[in-house]
Image (cartoon, rainbow, N blue to C red):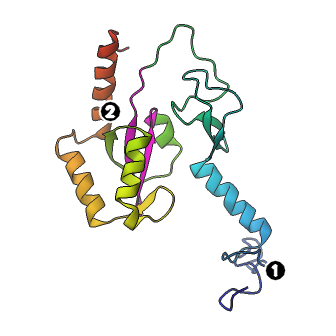
Amino acid sequence: MTSLQAAGCGIIDRASGEPCPRPVAAGDLNLCARHLLEAYDAVVGEVGVTDALPAPCAVCGSRLGVLYASGWLCAVCEWRHGEVPDEGAESVRVEVVYYLARLDRIKIGTSSNPRARLAQIPHDELLAFERGGRDLEQRRHREFAHCRAGREWFDRDPLLLAHLERLRADAPADPWQLYLRWRSEATALLGHHPA
């Protein structure tokens, strides 16, 4: 334990208003083992844990998934593990990199089902979409690594804000309209009519 750490856990009990008396778990965080696990569960519930799916995705066949508190999603197409697709249903997938604002941070993530994904992420505003998948997302993470504030969260940096302005310059004011246009184009390429 460093000289900066307190002897006990840093969590204040809501009921009593007193500090947790348990000893601090090993590491740099001022939390006992119980509160450290509760914090881990909260983070897993928000950002998920990437791992192998229990079985291949029923839609795209991928073995890679993300486990959330609500269950497994395919990491490629975000189909909920265990759900059976309609017979003969052919889904149009458009991968996007999304930029979300929450307080003073910006999240850069990717999804081929952004409505479902964004519904799971607490955010204040959808800033922009950029067409592309994991490769583009990882390239953006490297490009803005100097302002990384967490796994996929970044500080509002002038270079990142300038990038967002470029994305929005030629796009509709509502990023969802741009996404719908991309889906419509992809549907047309398949020779289907959108529903």
Q: Is residue 20 above or below residue 47?
A: below
Residue 146's quadrant in the figure?
bottom left
Q: Which residues are magenta?
A: 92-114
Q: Is residue 169 visible?
A: yes
The verdict on residue 105 being magenta is yes
Q: Amino acid at mark 2?
A: Tyr
For residue 185, side relative to residue 154 (left or right): left
Report the disc number at residue 21: 1
Q: Residue at x 68, y 62 (%)?
A: 39
Mark 2 lies on residue: 179
Label 2 SS = helix
Q: Residue at x 31, y 41 (%)?
A: 130
For residue 8, side relative to residue 156 (left or right): right
Q: Mark 2 vs mark 1: give the one in front.
A: 2
Label 1 SS = loop
The first of marks 2 and 1 along the sequence is 1
Residue 144's quadrant in the figure?
bottom left
Within 10 Å of disc 1 (Cα), the crowding (few <14, some 14-19, many 20+) is some
Marks 2 and 1 in Cβ contact (< 8 Å): no
The verdict on residue 99 being magenta is yes
Q: Is residue 90 above or below residue 152?
A: above
Q: Is residue 64 above or below residue 11?
A: above
